[in-house]
Image (cartoon, rainbow, N blue to C red):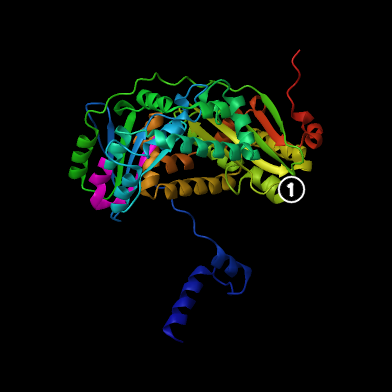
Amino acid sequence: MTIRPFLAALTLAALIPSGARADEPAARDAREKAPEPDAPRPFRLSTPTRFTLDNGLKVTLVPYGSVPKVLVRLVLRSGNVNESERQTWLSDLTGELLLEGTKTRSAMRISQDAAAMGGEVGVNPGENVTTIGGEVLSEFAAGMVTLVGDVARNPAFPASQLARLKTNQARRLSIAKSEPGQMANEAFRAAIYPGHPYGRIFPKVEDLQAFTLDDAKAFYAANYGADRATLYVVGVFDATATEAAIRTAFAGWGKATSPAPPAPPAASRRGFVVVDRPGASQSTLRLGLLVIDPTNPDYVPLLVTNALLGGSFGSRITSNIREQKGYTYSPGSQVSSRLKTATWAEAADVTTNVTGPALKEIFAEIERLRAEPPSAAELNGIQNYLAGTYVLSNSSRAGIAAQLQFLELHGLPDSYLTGFPTRVHAVTPDDVTRVAKAYLKPDEMTLVVVGDRKIIDEQLKPYQPPAKP
């Protein structure tokens, strides 16, 4: 007998119970049994260096990795939430104008300077924040800080580019408004956040066409300032040189002048919206409500509950209406957080003639989870999935910056980030049912359906709220 087969035989013998043959069931079970997972480990993060400039700009420096690259990202607490009713997408237009040139750099020069450092600079306006920055080679960390500072502080607002940018916005608006998923999102958000900026995701065409350069300049002056900004530097970089560049690039930057955005609604009310789409072969569903924001101790248990109910490929709703019933291809639920608020929503595109049956199954799964705890084995699988994907999502410079940005927005400590996997695994089956009962209340949910009314109206009758007296 050669050495390699002999060692293999010893290994196999150690795995097989005494008296069992290698071809018997006990032997096969021993070979096929997966190892027990390790205990959950906290997420590791290098200790950030933090300081604040005299003008209020916050800075967070995080050494990360060994690849000679660095991310420089300026996060401004300015976004769609700061828009008035007639200003929807003005934040987006203002952000796009920043890359059209500064007082000393043309748009081409901005692009060339970033490329010379091995990267590019981007501006991304969002609901609550606007980000400016990008990744470059480590040796150019200070240069990227200077470039980001110039883009943020010294926009030229060239009049020659306004018409082109507005035309691009109008094109995107036209495409979005023709998509059933976006139609459903618009109706859902308007019902959940009535009269609030979070409830306005698309502008009116006439408002978009009316935007002027002065509107963008005024929005910039009101909402961009050092007191609303945090600069993140993540990766491999010279901390001393980078800090010196930050103090030079952002010294003297003034403050924003606009008031704080309005508070979002505190509670959900039942809603029912049907958007007619004649001839549609599918019905697009949105079902959800307001839930707790990330500052609530139940937020992590809610994330686990969501993953088990509809927020993962192995979730109950997905298994039911996709794998068992074949009503849809890619359903999914999500907890979406915003400043001081969050929503839970299930989304699905189902075949038109099973719109009612699909809703029946979705509601049934919600009620089942509210009535009885999941098994420990089912919950453990979801916890492993959620904790694992969380660690993977933070295994990059951009991922770490995004998580730190999340903590800053919601006023959370670093321990939220580092202890997330442990808190996920601390959730019990009883916690899941308690959270489902407390926050996923079917009688407070808004249902939006985009589909062919002549086929779906009768199917939707059981889900309409009772008529008001």
Q: Which residue is mark 1?
A: 325
Residue drawn at x 31%, y 54% is: 118
- Please give left or right for residue 210 compared with residue 175 in the image: left
At 32% from the left and 52% from the top, the residue drawn is 115
Q: Position of residue 49 (x, y in %)?
A: 25, 39
Residue 148 in percent (x, y) is at: 30, 40
The magenta stretch is 129-146
Q: Is residue 136 magenta?
A: yes
- Vertical placement of residue 325 versus 30, above or below: above
Element under disc 1? loop
In the displayed orientation, state which residue is furthest to the front: 160
Determine the residue located farthest toward the bottom in the rendered image: 1
Of 419 and 56, the residue lying toward us:
56
Quadrant assignment for the C terminus: top right
Which of the two residues, 337 or 319, is positioned nearer the viewer here? 337
Q: Residue at the spot x=28%, y=32% of the render?
A: 58
| Amino acid on which disc 1 is placed | Lys
Question: On the image, which quarter does residue 269 sit in?
Answer: top right
Position in image of residue 100 (x %, y %): 37, 39
Q: Depth check: 452 or 266 in front? A: 452
- Would residue 462 be visible to someone looking at this image? yes
In the rendered image, residue 66 lying in the magenta stretch gets the answer no
